[in-house]
Image (cartoon, rainbow, N blue to C red):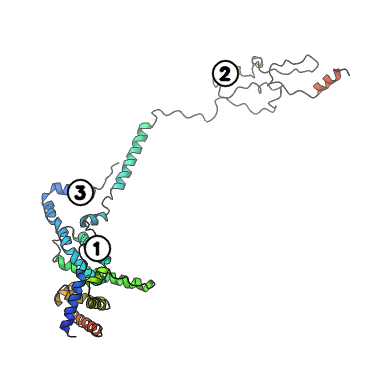
Amino acid sequence: MIFVLPMPTSLLRWWRGSAAAGPVVTAATAAPAIDELYRERRLPLVRLAVLMVDDLPTAEDIVQDVFTRLYRRHGTGLDTVADPNAYLVSAVMNAARSALRRRRIARAYLPPRPDPAPAAEDEVLLGTGDREVIRALSRLTTRQRQVIVLRYWSGLSEREIAGTLRITAGTVKSTAHRALTLLRAQLGEK
Amino acid sequence: MTETDLERRLRGALSARAAAVTGRDLRDEPALLRAARRSMPARWWLPPVAGLAVAAVSITAFALLRPADPAPAPPASPAWPVPPASPVLPTSPASPTSPARPMPGTTPTSSPDTTPTSSPDTTPAVTPPAPSRSSRAPSRSSSTAEPTPSASRPARILASTPR
């Protein structure tokens, strides 16, 4: 009787590495790519996610999930990704949108509860006018908020916003105009 | 409020909100690759290998500890032929086979001439009772083989006592 045991993946990886030195060298040089990207872009992406979901733990989870998915899909080397930064921003925006959708569904089925009180540091760092603006932003739709954040915080052009959100430039323009009209109405009443 | 003012307020508020999140507020930075690999079942081959090792150990132990010459199976029936059921009761003195019947299996190779049926005198433990009560009393050589005393014996003793 002959037992055919599949070779473990770690052994396969080791054998491949010892048999051919080329891919190993490439992988070794490309290995820090995602690590460096993670170290450089983690905080800005968390800030971007915070502007979307208003919740630091959720924002951290979103960014961590995005990087984990990126690693699983493309490995350590990001040669197949044309623009990793744009990819990450788009992924964070989509994940934030999914988180907001889940939160809205959960609020529809759970009894209402008071919103968590803002941290003391936020109260100190944010002035009264800034808090009003942030509160007015939270009343916008998810798409309008995405456009406003990408335009006025990330500094993206209309075409870049369209590419990131996978919508047309006309939709970006109309959405931004509608969002600014709503914000002006809310903030102008004060 | 002009649009320029609104845009300036928007930029200022978003920058202030984003600046409120610093690197110290974040969780400890985990190694991304370690965190990603931890969620993947990297050692899926461990249970099958463990099962194969246990099976190999079991088979080896069985092969080593198995007796080399298996013992013959015991006979299905005793070697001593059991005589057909006798109509006489075993306690009856007329049946000489009952008191001194050897235990089956103790002498499986003995010939039939050593059986109590052929020579009842060779068994000292068995003393057949006297056939008649008028003669002398039976010798009490063995209490186990003594038959049950009859009911007329105490009556004879009572009759001989003067009163």
Q: Position of residue B117 (x, y in %)?
A: 64, 19
Gap in Å between the C-alphas at discs 2 and 3? 78 Å
Say if B148 sits above or below A104 in the image: above
Q: Amino acid at mark 3?
A: Leu
Where residue A18 appears, as percent x and y from the top left, is: 14, 46
Which is more toward the observer, A28 or A41? A41
Q: Bin the neighbour count of mark 1 within 10 Å (Cα to Cα): few under 14, some 14-19, many 20 and up.
A: some
Task: Identify the residue under disc 1.
Answer: A65
Three-letter residue code for mark 2: Ser
Contact (Cβ within 8 Å) of mark 2 with mark 3: no
- Amino acid type, residue under disc 1 in the picture: Asp
Q: Circle 1 marks a residue in which chain? A: A
Is residue B137 in view from this perspective? yes
Q: In this rendering, which labeled residue sits more in front, label 1 or label 2?
A: 1
Graded by Cα atoms within 10 Å as few (under 14), some (14 to 19) or many (20 or more), the crowding at tag 2 reads few
Please give the residue where the numbered disc 3 appears in the rendered image: A12
Name the residue that disc number 2 marks.
B111
